[in-house]
Image: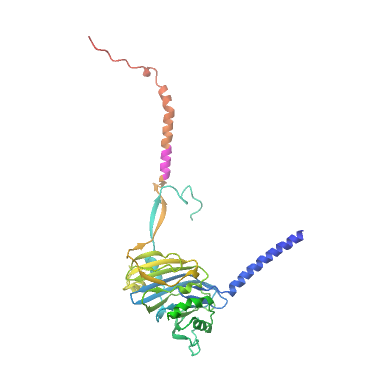
Amino acid sequence: MGGSLRRGARGRVLTVVLALLALQLGSLVAPAYACGCGALVPGSRQQVSVGREVSVVRWDGQQEQIVMRLSVTGDADRAAWIMPVPRRATVKLGDPALFDELTAATAPVERARYHFWPQDGDWPLTTGDGAGAPPPGESANAAPPQVGVVGRQRLGPFDVARLTATDPGALDGWLRTNGFAFPPRLESALQPYVDRRWEYVAVRLTPETAGTPLNGALDPLHLTFTADSPVYPMRLSRPARAPQSLGLYVLAPHRMEPASRIGGERPRVIFAGRVAATSGTPLAELADGTPFLTAVGQKFPTPATISGDHELRRAATDDSYRQVIYEERLRKVGGIPVWLLTVGGSLAALAIGLVWLTLRPRLWESVPAGAQQTPPAPPGPIG
C-alpha cells in the first residue's frame, strides 16, 4: 500500500515536471512576436515583446512626422521592425530628451484634498509602516526582385532600409534573406497596405554589444513623410500576443483626437493645451507651427481585435485639459484630527450633561431647611 502511494506521488511529480518542461520548450520554439505601431520580429528561437510604445505625431496640414520610441523585453539580441507609411519617408534618429520634455509638460497637477473621517493609513486605521555589427553590403541579390530598396542607412543601433513591395510575400522574402523569421499572421495584416500601395520602413535592431539582449527603451526614430491626413499605423499590432499600451502625443494647430477606438479601450485624453517649451529644445523645435499638444493614452487588452489605423481628426473645441492627482489628507487642527476633537468634545459635553442631570436632584435636596421656607405673602390693602 505504502509503495503504491509513493509510486503515485512520484508519478504526479513527474507529470508536473514534464508539463513545465513542455511549456518552457514551447516558449523557446514559438517566438513571442509583438508589435508596436509596426511589426517587431525577433531572430530564430528568441523572444521579444513591446511593453510600451510612445510616439509623437506632428501634423501641419501637409506633412506628418512621427517620432517613436519602443520599450522592449526579451532574450533576443537582434530583431527586425517594419512600419508602413503612406508616402516615401526620410528617417533619422530622434532625440530622447523630447520624451522627457513631453513627460514634464503633460505631468498631472498635484493638489491636496482633505477628508474629515479617517481612511486607510490614518490613525487608528494604520495597517503598517508607510515606509554592433556593420550593416550588410548592398548587392543585386540582397533582396527578392519584388522588393525595391529605396535607400539604406545606419543610424546608431539601427540598420534602416526603406522599401517598396507589391505583396506581403515579397516582404517575407526580404526578411528571410536577412535572417529573420516572418510571423504567418502578419501577412494578412500587411495586405491592406499593399492594396493602398504604401511603402515600408524596415529596421534591423542590434545592440551595441554583440549578444546583449534588447531590453528597455530603444533609441527613438524620427520619420517624415507627406500625407493627406494624419494617421498613426496600428494594424500591424494585430499579431501581438501580449496586451499593448499606446502613449500618443499629437502636435497640430488645434486639439486632435482619434476618430475611433479601432478595437481597443476608449482613448483617454491625458493632456490638452498649448506648448510652453523653452526655446532651442527638441520640443520647441518640433512644436514650431503646431503649438497645440494633445496627449492620448490607450490600452489594447486583445491586440487581435485591432481593426485599423488611428486616423486623427480635429476635436470639436480647443479646450485645455490637465489631469489632477489629489493627495488625500486628514483634516487637523494643531496636529490633532478634527474628527477626534469633534467626537471627543461631543462625548465630553454629553458626559457633563449626564452628570448634571444625575446630581441636580441631590443638590436641590441638600439646600438648608430655612432656605426652603415659603416667602411671606405681601401685605393686604390699608383701611
Quadrant containing the C terminus in the rendered view: top left
Q: Coloring scheme of the render?
A: rainbow
Residue closest to the far bottom: 140
Quadrant containing the N terminus in the rendered view: bottom right
- Expressed as whole percent of the image width and height from the top left, the position of residue 154 reads 45, 82
In the rendered image, the vertical position of residue 154 relative to residue 9, given as above or below: below
Is residue 39 found inside the magenta-colored segment of the image? no
Residue at screen point 38% across, 76% down:
65
Residue 207 seen in render:
no
- Front one among 62 and 118: 62
Is residue 343 found inside the magenta-colored segment of the image? yes
Q: Is residue 147 left or right of residue 31?
A: left
- Expressed as whole percent of the image width and height from the top left, the position of residue 37 reads 45, 73
- Expressed as whole percent of the image width and height from the top left, the position of residue 366 reads 42, 22
The residue segment tinted magenta is 339-347
Q: Quadrant of residue 248?
A: bottom left
Q: Quadrant of residue 224?
A: bottom left
